[in-house]
């Protein structure tokens, strides 16, 4: 509330200052071009014929002197003097040949006069007033007069213009939403037979997979209005506002039925009420209101409520029971085919060269979500423009993938020759370990050009096809590849550097997961020791074992890592010739592709 008062006060102060400044400017302007003289001087000027013309007003006489007559008076100035009871003035002026006149009053018609004096100020006040109201209202949400009213209106879209064709690679989700579309088309088909349709569906999935897009597409397919609000829109500082917004939203929705109400990021209000952190009155009230409204409204009218979240596990159980959000539509990260389709959808918006192979890009982007892919296509187009081309080429797309994964190239970072040399050996260490083992992904590219996100160089591997199951052997080999960077440094330079920190982190993570989650250690067998929370967000594992077991887990993880490091060392030691040959080649060229790498590797006798 304080905030708003402050705004009003500052608004008034600013207006005052502006008015004052305008006044000052006008007076200054007037002062500089008008000059008062006494009546005697005026008469002398008449006698000396220094005057061009005279305007006689009620209380003053304005005098325009002849140009260049008087050196002491600048040309532009107009003089004025007060009126005296001087009946002979007119005669004097006439004989001196001065043009003179007096303004004619009230030439304006009475109507114009009335408009100017009454209507104009009134209109100005009205507009000013409504402007203030509006700008205040925007900040308070829902107009200053209708405090707490839903601002759902702001977000209503009569036509979203999005269809299922715009959402690629979410076939299962689309299938489950199709029924809702059909229902919105023809509610009677369902109500006649006595079927009740779900009141709401909850879209669940990681950020950027297209949940919001899907909700819009449902509205677009069904050709109904789309009300969308974000969960945080309900949460206000003032207790009761959120609840009244919910009420208002549902009222409006029923008026506009059939329609879709979409509550994005519903976890902002739907958080479980039994939280340990202590309750939040406002949020609980809002949630209760939402629950009540969802029970209360008549779904046969054709209002369907969609909600999206990436933290389904923290939602209040009451929200999820039948009759509320009883349908759960999983919108997961796209697989290989899905990624290719998403790339195709977004590729339509840019001009692609004939050499573009989107399948290859899809292979290189395992784990990317729709938003990432859309971003990559755009980055590629931007790069094509930078390069002065009018078509997007495959290399633009690959570069965009790397930009999204590792950041932009940072060519101006100055590294010493020794550092560069070390990075080259480090990266070739990774690449060799990948190439010399059987179950690893082939090397796609090796580079020692630093990136903005911290990498001094990197080795990119690319799978030949997407895999859903990974064996223990493959995981072990992955760890060996990750540790081979440091192993190369150790062998060639006999020292350890900080450059391997990310490798170490990832290797440890894999090793730990092997022990605690995948049942791949001899000691614990198939005992689960960690479970994943927030599956759709960071997917961080949480320990479920005792502290004693935990320290044993650490020992087991260390064992795996040590074994893998030994393996990496021995792999590289037996291939020293290839290591130094490829490293010096890389040092010279800064970036080499996979086939170039394999060529050199194969030319070295083993
Ligand atoms: P979410 O709501 O799941 O976080 P959005 O629906 O806001 O993600 O998606 C963000 C953007 O990413 C969309 O506007 C779209 O351009 C792109 N996108 C995401 N998923 C897809 C998909 N399956 N098909 C096409 N584009 C997608
Ligand atoms: Mg969203
Ligand atoms: Zn590395």
Image (cartoon, rainbow, N blue to C red):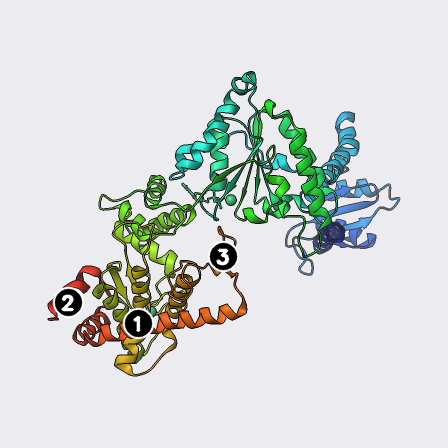
Disc on the earlier residue, 1 or 2: 1
CA separation, marks 1 and 2?
Answer: 19 Å
Residue ID at (79%, 26%): 110
In this rendered view, identify the residue nearer to me: 283 or 70: 283
Residue 350 drawn at (x, y percent): 33, 42
Front residue of 16 and 200: 200
Question: Can see residue 535?
Answer: yes
Residue 291 has which mark? Answer: none
Which residue carries the number 3 mark? 531
Say whether disc 3 or disc 1 marks the residue closer to the N-terminus. Answer: 1
Query: Which one is earlier in the sequence, the residue at label 3 or at label 2?
Result: 3
Q: Is residue 107 visible?
A: no
- The relative height of residue 29 versus residue 574 in the rendered view (above or below) is above
Q: Nearer the viewer, mark 1 or mark 2?
A: 1
Residue 346 is left or right of residue 437, and the answer is right
Q: CA distance from mark 3 to mark 1?
A: 30 Å
Please tell me whether mark 1 sits on a helix, a strand or a loop. helix
Query: Which residue is the site of mark 1?
Result: 485
For marks 3 and 2, give the CA distance.
44 Å
> Are there few (<14), some (14-19), or many (20+) residues within 10 Å of tag 3?
some
Depth check: give the residue in front, 32 or 605. 605
Would you name the residue on which mark 2 appears? Answer: 600
Disc 1 packing (10 Å; few <14; some 14–19; many ≥20):
many
Q: Marks 3 and 1: which is nearer the front? A: 3
Ligand 3 within 8 angstroms of badge 2 C-beta: no
């Amino acid at each position: 509330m304080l905030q708003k008062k402050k705004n009003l006060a500052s608004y008034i102060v600013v207006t005052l200052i502006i008015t004052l400044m305008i006044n000052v400017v006008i007076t200054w302007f007037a002062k500089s071009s008008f000059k008062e003289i006494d009546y005697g001087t005026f008469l002398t000027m008449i006698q000396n014929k220094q005057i061009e013309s005279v305007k006689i007003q009620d209380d003053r006489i304005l005098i325009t002197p002849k140009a260049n007559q008087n050196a002491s008076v600048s040309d532009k100035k107009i003089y004025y003097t007060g009126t005296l009871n001087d009946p002979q003035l007119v005669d004097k002026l006439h004989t001196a040949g001065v043009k003179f006149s007096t303004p004619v009053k009230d030439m304006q018609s009475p109507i114009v006069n009335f408009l100017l004096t009454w209507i104009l100020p009134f209109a100005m006040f009205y507009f000013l007033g409504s402007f203030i109201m509006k700008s205040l209202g925007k900040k308070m949400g829902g107009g200053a007069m209708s405090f707490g009213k839903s601002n759902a209106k702001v977000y209503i879209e009569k036509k979203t213009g999005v269809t299922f064709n715009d959402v690629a690679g979410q076939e299962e989700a689309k299938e489950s939403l199709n029924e809702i579309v059909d229902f919105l088309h023809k509610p009677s088909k369902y109500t006649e037979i006595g079927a009740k349709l779900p009141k709401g569906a909850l879209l669940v999935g990681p950020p950027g997979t297209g949940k919001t897009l899907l909700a819009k597409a449902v509205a677009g397919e069904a050709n109904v209005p789309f009300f969308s609000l974000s969960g945080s829109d309900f949460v206000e500082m003032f207790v009761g506002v959120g609840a009244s917004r919910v009420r208002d939203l549902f009222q409006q929705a029923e008026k506009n039925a059939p329609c879709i109400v979409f509550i994005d990021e519903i976890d902002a209000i739907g958080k479980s009420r039994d939280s340990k952190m202590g309750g939040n009155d406002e949020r609980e009230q809002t949630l209760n209101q939402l629950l009540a409204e969802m029970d209360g409204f008549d779904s046969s009218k054709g209002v369907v409520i969609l909600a999206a979240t990436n933290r389904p596990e923290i939602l209040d159980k009451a929200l999820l029971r039948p009759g509320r959000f009883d349908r759960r539509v999983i919108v997961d990260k796209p697989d290989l085919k899905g990624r290719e389709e998403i790339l195709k959808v977004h590729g339509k918006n840019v001009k692609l060269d004939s050499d573009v192979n989107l399948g290859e890009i899809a292979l290189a982007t395992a784990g990317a979500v729709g938003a990432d892919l859309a971003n990559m296509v755009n980055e590629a187009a931007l790069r094509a423009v930078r390069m002065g081309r009018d078509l997007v080429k495959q290399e633009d797309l690959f570069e965009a993938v790397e930009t999204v994964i590792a950041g932009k190239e940072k060519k101006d970072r100055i590294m010493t020759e020794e550092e560069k040399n070390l990075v080259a050996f480090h990266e070739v260490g990774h690449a060799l370990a990948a190439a010399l083992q059987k179950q690893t992904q082939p090397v796609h590219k090796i580079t020692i050009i630093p990136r903005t996100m911290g990498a001094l160089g990197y080795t990119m591997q690319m799978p030949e096809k997407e895999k859903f199951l990974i064996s223990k052997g493959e995981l072990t080999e992955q760890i060996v590849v990750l540790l081979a960077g440091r192993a190369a440094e150790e062998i060639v330079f006999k020292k350890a550097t900080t450059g391997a920190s990310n490798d170490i982190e990832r290797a440890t993570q894999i090793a730990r997961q092997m022990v605690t989650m995948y049942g791949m250690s001899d000691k614990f067998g198939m005992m689960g020791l960690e479970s994943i929370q927030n599956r759709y967000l960071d997917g961080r594992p949480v320990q479920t074992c005792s502290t004693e077991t935990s320290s044993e887990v650490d020992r087991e993880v260390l064992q795996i890592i040590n074994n893998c490091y030994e393996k990496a060392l021995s792999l590289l030691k037996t291939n020293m010739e290839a290591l130094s040959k490829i490293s010096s080649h890389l040092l010279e060229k800064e970036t080499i592709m996979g086939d170039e790498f394999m060529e050199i590797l194969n030319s070295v006798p083993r």
